[in-house]
Amino acid sequence: MDKAHPGGAEGQGAWPWPGTREIRGRIESVQDTRKITNAMYLIASTKMRKARKELDRTRPYFEAMRGEIKRVFRTAKRRGEPLFLSDGRHQPLGGDLRVSGDDGGQGNGGCI
């Protein structure tokens, strides 16, 4: 015979509450999940800090490169270079801007 739910109507079925052992198990499970979540948070924040440091380290190079690209296009517009400007009747022509660095004699020119 099933125990009735205290304060409930007849025929509600078995006692619905978990035992002490099950409650302890759930508490431990939640605590373990919290520890894992905290570890994941620490790992993510470390990766974010590293990425920000990399970004800050490369920012001067990016700004210098952006300035040089702007200068190239400003100069090309003044000269009327056909690679960068249209003559009004055609679509602007596409082009490549190749940037290279000192490759240390490795042969590929370090093109990007």
Image: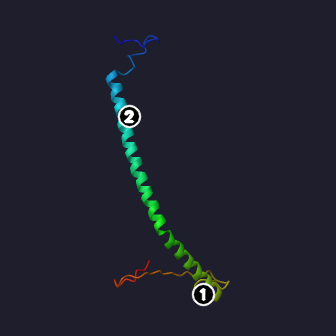
> Is 98 drawn above or below residue 60 in the view shown?
below
Front: mark 1 or 2 = 2
Determine the residue located farthest toward the right in the rendered image. 88
Q: Point out residue 107 in the picture as x, y percentages from the top left corner.
A: 35, 85
Determine the residue located farthest toward the left in the rendered image. 21
In the rendered structure, find residue 82 and report the number of the disc placed on it: 1
Task: Give the tally of numbered discs.
Answer: 2
Mark 1 neighbour class, 10 Å CA radius: few under 14, some 14 to 19, many 20 or more = some
Query: Which amino acid, by three-letter code, is at mark 1?
Result: Pro
Query: Which amino acid, by three-letter code, is at mark 2?
Result: Val
Horizontal side, residue 107 vs residue 90: left or right = left
Label 1 with label 2: CB-CB less than 8 Å: no
Question: Which residue in the structure is indicated by mark 2?
Answer: 30
Relative depth, front residue between 99 and 49: 49
Q: Point out residue 77 in the picture as x, y percentages from the top left corner.
A: 63, 84
The residue under the point 53% across, 82% down is 95
> Is 29 drawn above or below residue 105 in the view shown?
above
Question: Which quadrant is the C terminus positioned in?
Answer: bottom left
The residue under the point 47% across, 80% down is 99
Q: Secondary structure at mark 2?
A: helix
Horizontal side, residue 59 vs residue 4: left or right = right
Q: CA distance from mark 1 to mark 2?
A: 67 Å
Question: Which quadrant is the N terminus positioned in?
Answer: top left
Q: Point out residue 56 in the picture as x, y percentages from the top left corner.
A: 48, 65
Mark 2 neighbour class, 10 Å CA radius: few under 14, some 14 to 19, many 20 or more = few
**Mark 1 vs 2, N-terminal side:** 2
The residue under the point 36% across, 83% down is 104
Q: Secondary structure at mark 1?
A: loop
Relative depth, front residue between 88 and 20: 20
